[in-house]
Amino acid sequence: MNAPLIFIEEMKVETIIGVSSWERALPQTLLIDLEMALPQITSTTTDAIGDTIDYGIVAARIKSIASNHTFKLLEPLAHLIIETLEKEFKSPWLKLKISKPQILPQVKAVGVIFEKGTRT
């Protein structure tokens, strides 16, 4: 049996990001999708928040990283988020997608997907 996952879908975060000066003039809204494997399966039987990963705390951590850092590219932002979450929440597997909506004409969104660890 694979480890249970928590997920966050289309979380909106504001940050200064982009290569062009017009992109960096004002904060942009990014969309974050995240899947994280739980470090233990105990939460499926104990019903205790301490035996799982609190997605509210994860969401707050992502928002804090995005609002307190500025990057030109999505890649270093994604790397910082995934490394921080892995370290702080001890997740054995994470998948992170960051989308920049409507940044290119006739394109819904562009972005990056990072996956780290082993899903067991």
Image: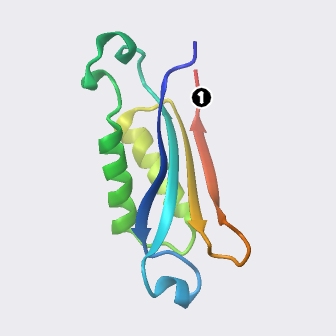
Task: Indicate the position of residue 58 as horizontal and vertical percent values.
Answer: 35, 44
Residue 49 position (above or below residue 105): above
Quadrant of the frame with the C terminus: top right
Identify the residue shown where x is 65% and y is 65%: 109
Seen as rendered, the residue at the extreme right is: 106
Would you identify the image quadrant in which residue 72 lies? bottom right
Residue 77 position (above or below residue 49): below
Task: Indicate the position of residue 13 as horizontal and vertical percent values.
Answer: 41, 62
Would you identify the image quadrant in which residue 98 lies? bottom right
Q: Is residue 118 left or right of residue 62?
A: right
Residue 111 position (above or below residue 120): below
Residue highlighted by disc 1: 118
Identify the residue shown where x is 53% and y is 90%: 21
Task: Indicate the position of residue 102 as horizontal and vertical percent values.
Answer: 62, 72
Identify the residue shown where x is 42% and y is 77%: 27
Identify the residue shown where x is 46% and y is 47%: 83
The number of discs equals 1
Task: Indicate the position of residue 19 as horizontal and vertical percent values.
Answer: 58, 81
